[in-house]
């Protein structure tokens, strides 16, 4: 009886895990959608770094929004960059990436970053985001291509934009033509989206931290479940079924 109950519990766990992996359905993007992206609820929330995700699509474009109100998460993005990976086949493989924002040359400490954010009004911070983050990198592993481009390049097909608006501290928006992701006119059905930091927190990175922060990091590493105290973004993948008109 014990073995039978154990088997039933194991099956229930497997079924629950499978149910939890069901793809989220993207929003259909209309031609007049531009000013209404913010009105839609987030489709997915990644709790570790407090990042919400929205995905919109039509037959021409896929729009992805990553948003957070966490200064700690924003500091991770500033210091080590943000890499957004997309698998157009929905298999959570690193196929196409947008590296943006790019990592800072000199990392901020907690105190420095807090002081940095406090310098700006909301309007000034919007201007800071536009001026500070212009370079971004596009990677396509299918053709072994890596291209460094800029938000100032108007003819670039993949568009990126940062905003601080509607009580959202940091809103990241990327618009990708479906023909960039789906080569040879393949049918767009389901995509996997994943994020991680561009750089890792190596010894050089930690050398920019205060002695107090280094001590705290060493103490954190001795704790059970210390992963939550990492200075990189937590890596994750989630699947979305693309919407039909």
Image (tube, rainbow, N blue to C red):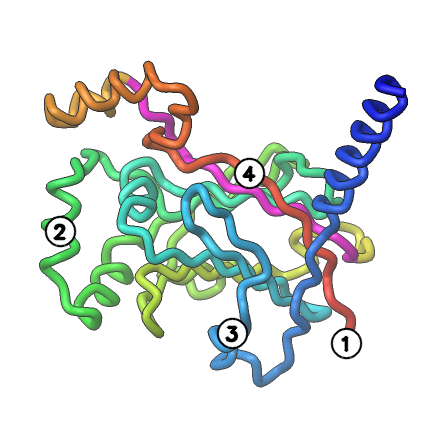
- Element carrying mark 3: helix
Q: CA distance from mark 3 to mark 2?
A: 29 Å
Q: Is residue 156 visible?
A: no
Residue at 54% across, 63% down: 42
Residue 245, disc = 1
Residue where numbered disc 4 is placed: 236
Crowd tier of the residue under label 4, counting other residues whose Cα lies within 10 Å: few below 14, some 14–19, many 20 or above: few
Residue at 25% across, 66% down: 126
Q: Is residue 42 above or below residue 44?
A: below
Residue 116, disc = 2
Check if mark 1's residue and mark 3's residue have beta carbons within 8 Å: no
Residue at 73% across, 61% down: 242
Nearest to N terminus: mark 2 or mark 1? 2
Crowd tier of the residue under label 1, counting other residues whose Cα lies within 10 Å: few below 14, some 14–19, many 20 or above: few
Nearest to N terminus: mark 3 or mark 4? 3
Q: CA distance from mark 3 to mark 4?
A: 23 Å
Crowd tier of the residue under label 3, counting other residues whose Cα lies within 10 Å: few below 14, some 14–19, many 20 or above: some
Residue where numbered disc 3 is placed: 37
Nearest to N terminus: mark 3 or mark 2? 3
| Image: magenta residue range | 188-202
Kindly indicate the quadrant of the structure image that contains residue 64.
Answer: bottom right
In the picture provided, is 70 more to the left or to the right than 198? Answer: left
């Amino acid at each position: 009886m014990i073995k039978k109950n154990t088997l039933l519990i194991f099956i229930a766990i497997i079924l629950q895990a499978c149910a939890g992996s069901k793809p989220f359905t993207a929003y259909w993007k209309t031609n007049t959608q531009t000013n209404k992206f913010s009105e839609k609820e987030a489709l997915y929330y990644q709790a570790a770094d407090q990042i919400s995700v929205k995905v919109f699509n039509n037959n021409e474009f896929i729009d992805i929004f990553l948003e957070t109100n966490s200064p700690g998460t924003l500091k991770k993005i500033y210091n080590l960059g943000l890499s957004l990976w997309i698998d157009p086949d929905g298999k959570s493989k690193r196929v196409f990436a947008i590296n943006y924002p790019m990592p800072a040359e000199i990392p901020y400490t907690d105190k420095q970053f807090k002081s940095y954010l406090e310098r700006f009004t909301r309007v000034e911070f919007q201007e800071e985001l536009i001026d500070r983050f212009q370079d971004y990198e596009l990677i396509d592993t299918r053709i072994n291509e890596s291209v460094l481009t800029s938000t100032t390049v108007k003819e670039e097909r993949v568009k990126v934009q940062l905003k601080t608006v509607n009580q959202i501290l940091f809103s990241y928006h990327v618009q990708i033509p479906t023909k960039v992701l789906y080569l040879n006119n393949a049918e767009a059905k389901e995509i996997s989206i994943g994020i991680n930091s561009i750089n890792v927190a190596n010894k050089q990175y930690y050398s920019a931290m205060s002695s107090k922060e280094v001590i705290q990091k060493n103490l954190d590493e001795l704790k059970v479940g210390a992963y939550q105290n990492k200075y990189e973004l937590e890596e994750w993948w989630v699947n979305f079924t693309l919407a039909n008109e």
